[in-house]
Image (spheres, grey):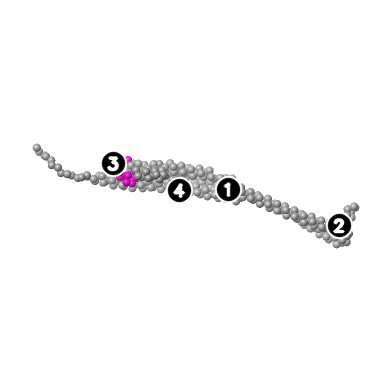
Amino acid sequence: MRKKLAALLLTGAIALAPMQPAYALFGVGDVVIDPTNLAQNILTAARTLEMINNQITQLQNEAQMLINQGRNLANLPHSSLVRLRSIMQQTEDLLGEAQHVRYVVSEIERVFSEQYGDAAATGDFAAMNANAEARWRTSVAGYEDALKVQAGVVGNIEATRTELSTLVSQSQGAVGALQAAQAGNQLLALQSQQMTDLTAAIAAQNRADALDAARRASAEAQGRENLNRFLDYGSGYTPTAVSMFR
């Protein structure tokens, strides 16, 4: 609108100029007006106005750019790190409560060397029976541990679902690139937590199955040894002279 007004004024001034000689002047009282200078002043004012408008537009663009940069650098207001660490710690604690045979290689080697395999067929009958009972208790405890871990994993589902919903909302409402990236990273962390729970459940179940399979194999070894001892008649019968009558 400002450009159109300046153009109309300029047009009117130029249209009036040819009607008078180049040296003609209009006087109103003591004020003298030169139409040619008037037209040049109006043209200069229009150009100045256009320049100012361009500068204003440029400043507005720069301000918007700074606003966008600020948004791109803004941190996500929500963090799932503490919650995810808590969930993973609960699962780790359940694994750490493994009874009889923990998830430690050195302890597994010790227990198996003392109670399983060839050890099941050594010692007297009382010792073998005691080892057999210990192996049975370990197998039962293994299945109990697996059920505890599975129950803990199932209990984490609700917390995981809530956190997932929150992160998706944060991602959709991200105002900049940094917030979107942080939301994506937290979603990946949530996925990692779910994979950790799944791994823990599988490990606990496989541990229980392995202990029970080792118990059955050791029971077979003990059974064979018991049978061999039962069928061992020693050196057999040796005839000796017996005096029936004096």
Residue 11 coordinates in the image, percent (x, y)? 81, 59
* Image quarter in which the N terminus is found: bottom right
Mark 1, mark 4: which one is toward the viewer?
4
Q: Secondary structure at mark 2?
A: loop
The numbered disc on residue 34 is: 2
Q: Amino acid at mark 1?
A: Gln
Q: Are marks 2 and 3 in contact (CB under 8 Å)?
A: no
Residue 102 coordinates in the image, percent (x, y)? 41, 43
- The residue under the point 52% across, 50% down is 188
Q: Residues within 10 Å of mark 4 (few under 14, many from 20)?
A: few
| Residue at the spot of label 1 | 170
Q: CA distance from mark 4 to mark 2?
A: 93 Å
Q: Amino acid at mark 3?
A: Asp
Q: Residues within 10 Å of mark 2 (few under 14, many from 20)?
A: some
| Residue at the spot of label 3 | 124
| Residue at the spot of label 4 | 199
Going from N to C along the chain, the mark reached first, 4 or 2, is 2
Q: CA distance from mark 1 to mark 3?
A: 68 Å
Going from N to C along the chain, the mark reached first, 4 or 3, is 3
Q: CA distance from mark 2 to mark 1?
A: 67 Å
